[in-house]
Amino acid sequence: MRHSGGYAASYGAGELDKLVEQRFNEIFEHEVSVFFVATGTAANSLAIAAEARPGGIALCHTGAHVIEDECGAPELYSGCRLAPVGGKQGKIDPDQLRQAFGQFIPGFVHHGRPTMVTITQANESGCVYSLDEIAEIRAITSENKVALHMDGARFANALASLDISPAEMTWKTGVDYLSFGGTKNGCWCAEALVCFDPAKAEEIHFLRKRAGQLFSKSRFIAAQFEAYLRDDLWLELARHSNEMARQLAEKISLYNDLSIPWQPQANEVFVVMEVERAKRLQARGAWFFDFPIPPAHRNLVGEGQNLYRFVTSFSTTSEDIGNFSKLLKD
Amino acid sequence: MRHSGGYAASYGAGELDKLVEQRFNEIFEHEVSVFFVATGTAANSLAIAAEARPGGIALCHTGAHVIEDECGAPELYSGCRLAPVGGKQGKIDPDQLRQAFGQFIPGFVHHGRPTMVTITQANESGCVYSLDEIAEIRAITSENKVALHMDGARFANALASLDISPAEMTWKTGVDYLSFGGTKNGCWCAEALVCFDPAKAEEIHFLRKRAGQLFSKSRFIAAQFEAYLRDDLWLELARHSNEMARQLAEKISLYNDLSIPWQPQANEVFVVMEVERAKRLQARGAWFFDFPIPPAHRNLVGEGQNLYRFVTSFSTTSEDIGNFSKLLKD
Amino acid sequence: MRHSGGYAASYGAGELDKLVEQRFNEIFEHEVSVFFVATGTAANSLAIAAEARPGGIALCHTGAHVIEDECGAPELYSGCRLAPVGGKQGKIDPDQLRQAFGQFIPGFVHHGRPTMVTITQANESGCVYSLDEIAEIRAITSENKVALHMDGARFANALASLDISPAEMTWKTGVDYLSFGGTKNGCWCAEALVCFDPAKAEEIHFLRKRAGQLFSKSRFIAAQFEAYLRDDLWLELARHSNEMARQLAEKISLYNDLSIPWQPQANEVFVVMEVERAKRLQARGAWFFDFPIPPAHRNLVGEGQNLYRFVTSFSTTSEDIGNFSKLLKD
Amino acid sequence: MRHSGGYAASYGAGELDKLVEQRFNEIFEHEVSVFFVATGTAANSLAIAAEARPGGIALCHTGAHVIEDECGAPELYSGCRLAPVGGKQGKIDPDQLRQAFGQFIPGFVHHGRPTMVTITQANESGCVYSLDEIAEIRAITSENKVALHMDGARFANALASLDISPAEMTWKTGVDYLSFGGTKNGCWCAEALVCFDPAKAEEIHFLRKRAGQLFSKSRFIAAQFEAYLRDDLWLELARHSNEMARQLAEKISLYNDLSIPWQPQANEVFVVMEVERAKRLQARGAWFFDFPIPPAHRNLVGEGQNLYRFVTSFSTTSEDIGNFSKLLKD
């Protein structure tokens, strides 16, 4: 509300935009280029496009949002292919990643060529890569001379989970691009691509405009981030939703007919449940969905069962958890 | 503010979204499909993509926003080429349009094939196509079996200018797609593609998602349109900015060394002025820019002069006009 | 040589082109549309493009040429994604295919939507789908309302192997598009896309031209096919190369330290061999390469071993086989 | 025929390929990278793609083959837009080119950015840029830091016309890429992209493969060029077809009701003629077509008249000219 009146320069040239960009520099302890966009899909797709080359291939987890939930946007923006790499709990397995790279021969045009590895932090399975795990993947990308992108639609949740700094999670561990998500943590359509090498900014400016993602009234995203990043609000919100997930998992673990295949590390709890039981819960007003069972975890789900995802957020309350717990009991 | 709390279904499935879609049906007196997007560039590009075919060509005015100011977004979304057609005052000249169509031979693959004509209403020169002019273009597109798109970044201004209904301006005159702009008339990043043939909606849903333009928190655009369209607020705002342009033109016409090459029909006033005079005005705080001289109007601008664009808006006041008028006098 | 002099209409409009198109109708016992192109990659990519829709996905085997060896050409031509499906011996496993289709929900834009299944006949592992196997895949594609494409870079070898007619192998079993390869069986750069639904021809004409694959001197491909298809020359050549592969496999099977993981069904023999033994053979002049081990067959190859591919052709002689056999013995 | 038997390495790695590449170095007196492709459209499109950047724009003449006759292939390969620039006789007018560049502001993403100027030599109007004219365009491209491409579908005719060396026509005057055409001058589908900066070769290799333009049996194009370039055969053929055009123009100029709006400089003669006269000639067996009247020359063609193009070739004979002359007289 504070920033909605008066005049300001458009297309990101306004004072508030500049101020927020500066704020990103401080938070990341690094000079970064920040590109506001409308959706997480756009941020991810821009990142892949920023490193695109003809015949390019971006390697991602088999269940990554970029390959499963973006309807070809990364390919449209970049012209690259996405190649899936397996791994448990939504994390790329380093051995499988090495094997994937092993298929490529420099200069051998038939196979195309890798240009990027993209990881999700926290990921689609509600898990978080440790710094060591990121470093191991970074070592592989360095050896193969490709960039590393982090899809941070739940970046704040991952930071809260590992209790480390934004710098440690990103450029200090070798991340080149970060999709910085605000939407899932309380903003409205405020997403950004953060590029840790400002020399690449000019190219991304053209890529963003070409994608129809350059806002004239850019300040309305800036205004959101201004509030979001002030006084660590973003981290506080993330800590809260993580805590809600922890409480939820605790409640669920009390029931023998429900199993939690891996402990939540952020704001998502995965549960294996009888389909019938899930339907009864949903009929009584619980709002959750089944989730595609990752190939690496097919053994966890028996006949008549399914895998369900429960997501907590900045607005989930202990009371909500209590109400769901009561439903479970009944 | 009213709609910012609580829970709602995401990705356009919420009640507010449905309500606003219904509101569009009423306003256009027609069942329409509405697609919220982040930018006018996205709306235009989606429209062109909705009719795209391999080798497709969208015909537009030489100075149209799609070809001059969207950095290739229409081509990225659609895979089509944009072909410029001349005409005075930012309007496609029907004879030149017929000539352009005359170059294409059905089934002759070398030249590609036209798929769409796109016109801007009100256009980049601040002018408005009359209903007869739209009908003449529609006749040409019908004969050539291509769709007609209207870039309505300033749609409300055009309605206010012609004092006709949204239905008359669009489907009743044969418009197939409308980019419905809210941003320039008071919204924040609230733009929509309106498609008058709901049978094409499914395709556009995929196109929009593929472009990274599907909002999860779609209701925040819906909320803007809900207010924008209520009690004709949008038309009132447009009438105001048009009136401000009229007043501005009146003031400017008092000066012999300033010339208005064509009368403003919406919220933009174009002025031929000595470059030195413009610089002095700008130095004293007037904020306006020179504008690329359209090929069809090169004769209007003499040595040492330039063409300048003055834009009024929903927030321009008579006092602003008065202040500028004083500057001119000094 | 017969057709190289004199004048003829260009771009496929010549008499010889028309005559060869007619010949294709006869061979397939069906009215077909034939599109000459320069490479097999182009034929496959055109087929995928012919069924493309925004967010489209073509399902193929994990080791298919389209996904492994075409450097993104199918994606460039079509804008679609390729999604890999597993299966032994280079054949799509129907259960895995059903599972892959199961991930898609009609109208759910996030995941994209399948538009095609593409199979290779004879495939990259030298194996051939039986008619029953094709029919089973066709049943799945029909249920999911997507087209079926056959990459027939080795189509003649497959026909010779199964000893059935071109019609039985294709439209009678439900194939919609066939990449008809000539290059591997004696032609020079004579490849064609055969479409069994001539109503789709106009679109493909534009797609081909847009891909830079429309030859002005089209008759020089036509001339090759005219000879290739006359008196069953193409099938004779294929029978010969298949027979050479059979003889080669017979020789190889005499050696205990060499193993043939699956029997050749066309003109390729795959052999598991010690890397050192392979190097010695190559040093003595045998020309063959190692082959990426398909994920479904990783268990077949032990430590210090590799998988090698031996390809026979129309020009391989029994003497060649004998010479290689001698090398093996030494 | 000499090269059609025996074995050779595939995909351009064979001895003959290497030998022909070396031959190109000699002819151009420069180390060049040569990329064989199937069509002139492919060569042009590859060149534009080689310099492509997001938001990129290639400037060409309004009547250039790339924009008029390639059905969007340049855009597909490159993702760039083509922007037309006017000029008489099929040549880009330097003033209009400067004006076109003047519209672009470095870093201003809305307009996109120029990446290339492409000229045609000899061009679609049968005219030839002089070395000075090329140099003037090169000066403009250099100032604007974009590359210069020459569409040489009729390169040999231009060389023969100006009687200069391939080096003078290209890199010595600042040409960065040349589409080297063989098809129009006697080859069959033998076209090549010549890049004068071999550092860019790796990228183009991927671009070519991604476009489905990498031949396995590359030697069959190499074999054509081997003969074509030997003993200046290519220049001899071009000189012949130019001479035929000269003779044809001479004959035509004898008739008062036929007018030649500009003198042929290569192998094409343009004639303004009554439509009725043209129809009578065509009915008597003369094979020629009307040609879209370039905007810059609309004043040359009166009511009831049309512009016709007569093309001579390596295989045109003086007898052919004589026969046509007789037809004219009758």
Image (cartoon, coloured by chain):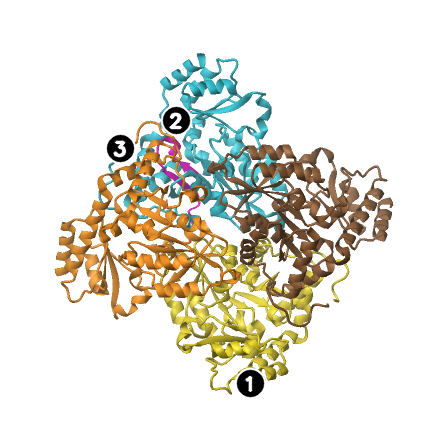
Chain colours: A cyan, B orange, C brown, D yellow
Mark 3 chain: B
Q: Is residue A202 visible?
A: no
Closer to us: mark 3 or mark 1?
A: 1
Q: Say which amino acid is labelled 2.
A: Ser
- Indicate which label's residue lies in the foreground, 2 or 1: 1
Q: Nearer the viewer, residue A297 or B6?
A: B6
- Amino acid type, callout 3: Met
- Which residue is labeled 3 in the image? B1
Task: Tell me the number on the disc at residue D330.
Answer: 1
Q: Which image quarter holds the N terminus of chain B?
A: top left
Residue D225, image x and y in percent?
A: 66, 68
Label 1 crowd (10 A; few <14 / some 14-19 / many >=20): few
Inter-mark Cα distance, 3 to 2: 20 Å
Mark toward the viewer: 3 or 2: 3
> In the rendering, which numbered label is found on residue A313?
2
| Residue D145: percent from left, percent from top | 44, 62
Tag 3, which secondary structure? loop
Q: Residues within 10 Å of mark 2 (few under 14, many from 20)?
A: many
Q: Is residue B194 visible?
A: yes
Magenta part of the chain: A179-199
Residue drawn at 43 percent across, 48 percent down: B50
> Does mark 1 fall on the same chain as mark 3?
no
